[in-house]
Image: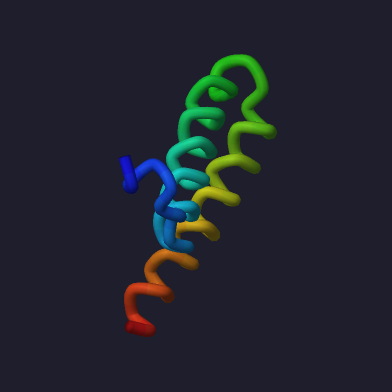
């Protein structure tokens, strides 16, 4: 019950954002390739943020 009230860490939030961006990029891949590329680039920047957080610890 107490885990429902527990806040997510910054790393967890970034990981969820990364997963969402990858899914959106996959969906757009065949219909709107330029938008898909933008999503993948943003996902890569998010992944870089996650890696820099891990290296900072």
Which residue is at the far front? 1
Q: Quadrant of the N terminus?
A: top left
Q: Residue drawn at (47%, 29%), measured in percent from left and top? A: 23
Q: Position of residue 9 (x, y in %)?
A: 43, 61
Q: Give the left or right position of residue 38, taking residue 2 as reference.
A: right
Please say if 23 is above or below 50.
above
Please say if 57 is above or below 13.
below
Q: Position of residue 42 (x, y in %)?
A: 59, 50
Front one among 49 and 5: 5
Q: Position of residue 3 (x, y in %)?
A: 33, 46
Q: Residue drawn at (39%, 41%), measured in percent from left and top? A: 4
How many discs appear? Answer: 0
Q: Position of residue 40 (x, y in %)?
A: 54, 43
Q: Quadrant of the C terminus?
A: bottom left
Q: Residue drawn at (40%, 52%), measured in percent from left and top? A: 6
Please say if 16 is above or below 29.
below
Which residue is at the far bottom? 56
Q: Quadrant of residue 35?
A: top right
Q: Residue drawn at (48%, 55%), measured in percent from left and top? A: 14
Q: Quadrant of residue 16?
A: top left
Q: How is the image coloured?
A: rainbow
Q: Give the left or right position of residue 42, taking residue 50 as reference.
A: right
């Amino acid at each position: 019950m107490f885990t429902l009230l527990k806040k997510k860490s910054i790393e967890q939030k970034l990981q969820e954002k990364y997963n969402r961006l990858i899914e959106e990029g996959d969906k757009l891949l065949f219909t709107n390739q330029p938008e898909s590329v933008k999503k993948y680039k943003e996902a890569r920047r998010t992944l870089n943020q996650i890696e820099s957080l891990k290296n900072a610890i």
